């Protein structure tokens, strides 16, 4: 049995496609969260509360990120999550 036809080799196309997909994934995952200190996180969460994106639940001591339904007990975790969630949603919108 003869090997694959060298003129019909699409493996390079597949490799290029995978590289492009990995680059897009890195871009979406590469949201800069290093600059989220306590003050920045508190300010972002306060803004999100004001626009009804986050709901505080004082009796449970959590903050609920309404679009995702995820609860957090840390303003910093919520701020980092929201930045990543927003970046992921924006990346999805660009891909459409």
Image (tube, rainbow, N blue to C red):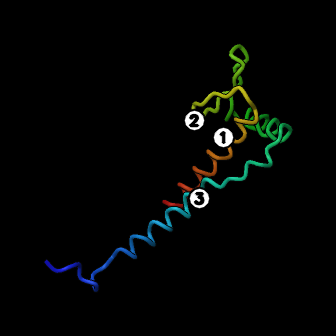
Closer to the camera in the image, 5 or 95: 5
Query: Residue placed farthest to the bottom in the image?
Result: 7
Task: Please tell me how crowded label 2 is: few (under 14), some (14-19), or many (20+) other residues with Cα within 10 Å.
Answer: few
What residue is shown at x 63% (from left), y 51% (from top)? 87
- Tell me the quadrant of the picture where the N terminus can be found: bottom left
Q: Earlier in the sequence, mark 3 or mark 1?
A: 3
Percent x, y of residue 64: 65, 28
Label 3 vs label 1, nearer the camera: 3
Instruction: Indicate left or right for 15 with 36 as reference.
Output: left
Splitting the image into 4 quarters, where does residue 76 fall?
top right
Where is 5 relative to 85, above or below?
A: below
Task: Please tell me how crowded label 3 is: few (under 14), some (14-19), or many (20+) other residues with Cα within 10 Å.
Answer: few
Percent x, y of residue 7: 28, 86
Q: Which residue is mark 3?
A: 26
Label 2 vs label 1, nearer the camera: 1
What residue is shown at x 53% (from left), y 54% (from top)? 92
Q: CA distance from mark 3 to mark 2?
A: 22 Å
What residue is shown at x 59% (from left), y 36% (from top)? 67
What residue is shown at x 71% (from left), y 24% (from top)? 56
What label sits on residue 81 in the rendered view?
A: 1
Percent x, y of residue 79: 72, 39
Query: Residue placed farthest to the right in the image?
Result: 39
Closer to the camera in the image, 12 or 91: 12
Instruction: Indicate left or right for 53 with 37 as reference.
Output: left
Q: Which residue is mark 2?
A: 68
User: What is the secondary structure assignment of the residue under circle 2?
Assistant: loop
Q: Earlier in the sequence, mark 3 or mark 2?
A: 3
Percent x, y of residue 29: 61, 53
Where is 76 relative to 61, above or below?
A: below
User: What is the secondary structure assignment of the residue under circle 1?
Assistant: helix
Badge 2 vs badge 1, beta-carbon distance below 8 Å: yes
């Amino acid at each position: 049995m003869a090997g694959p036809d060298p003129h019909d080799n699409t493996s390079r196309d597949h490799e290029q496609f995978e590289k492009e997909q990995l680059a897009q994934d890195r871009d979406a995952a590469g949201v800069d969260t290093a600059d989220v200190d306590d003050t920045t996180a508190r300010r972002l969460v306060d803004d999100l509360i004001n626009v009804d994106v986050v709901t505080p639940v004082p009796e449970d001591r959590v903050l609920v990120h309404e679009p995702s339904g995820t609860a957090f007990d840390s303003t910093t975790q919520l701020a980092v999550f929201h930045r990543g969630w927003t970046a992921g949603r924006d990346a999805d919108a660009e891909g459409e």
